[in-house]
Amino acid sequence: MGWNEFYFLLRGMQWTVALAAIGFVGGIATGLLVALARTSGKRWLVRITAGYIAVFQGTPLLMQLFVVYYGLALVGLKLDAWIAVAIGFTLHASAYLGEIWRGSIEAVPRGQQEAAKALSLGYVARMKDVILPQAFRISLPATIGFLVQLIKGTSLAAIVGFTELSRAGSIVSNQIFQPLLVFGIVGALYFTLCWPLSIYGTRLERRLATAAR
């Protein structure tokens, strides 16, 4: 296990971070739309988004990536592995974040909605200036917790040949025949990424709980 092998693992870690970041940012954008649709009160929107969430929460992420990469290729849409996993993780994240934020929006005291309506605020102004800032604060610990899970979930991208940290570890292990050493380092690198986020999420949750008393 030399510097070249360790550098290859660091490159894999770089792609793990990039993939998690793209999936998370894309999930934020689409997840917000899902959450707003779920709380819109329009029955058809609620049913469509509820079905969307049920599909992605009720099936393994591994299968979702498999369908995006290989399933679309069957209908003539051949995607690069990088694009396929980015789309797969974005869809996966949007379903989970949409449900987290739906719960956070509904957790905002109903009196806030009624007060905003009494001030004649429209839907956009009501959500932007009154509801979403409070819902965002409520959702932060759960959102950070999901980000940790998303980072660890990037290891499944290896199914379509994407070289992230876990696959980089497999490649190095097959070259130097020291799997315990290699995957010990891989585990330490994942821990380096996830542990600070977990600690931050726990502290943030405690701080918000204290402020709410």
Image: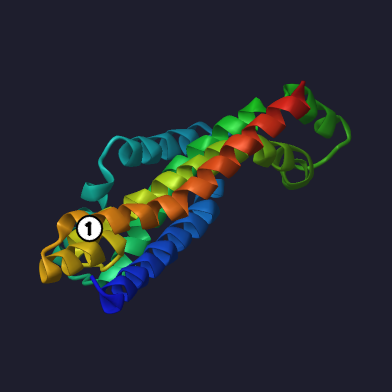
Residue 160 located left or right of residue 22 = left
* Amino acid found under the numbered disc labelled 1: Leu
Q: Image height check: is 87 above or below 33?
A: below
Furthest-bottom residue in this view: 4
Closer to us: 42 or 155 = 155
Closer to us: 47 or 177 = 177
Residue 195 located left or right of residue 58 = right
Q: Position of residue 149 (x, y in %)?
A: 40, 44
Q: Position of residue 165 (x, y in %)?
A: 31, 62
Quadrant for the N terminus in the image:
bottom left
Closer to us: 182 or 25 = 182
The quadrant holding residue 135 is top right
The quadrant holding residue 115 is top right
In the picture of the structure, the residue carrying the numbered disc 1 is: 181
Residue at figure coordinates x 26%, y 39% from the top left:
59
Question: What colouring style does the render use?
Answer: rainbow
Give neighbour class at mark 1: few <14, some 14-19, many 20+ (Cα, 10 Å): some
Residue 41 located left or right of residue 85 = right
Furthest-top residue in this view: 213
Q: Is residue 69 visible?
A: no
Q: Is residue 124 visible?
A: yes
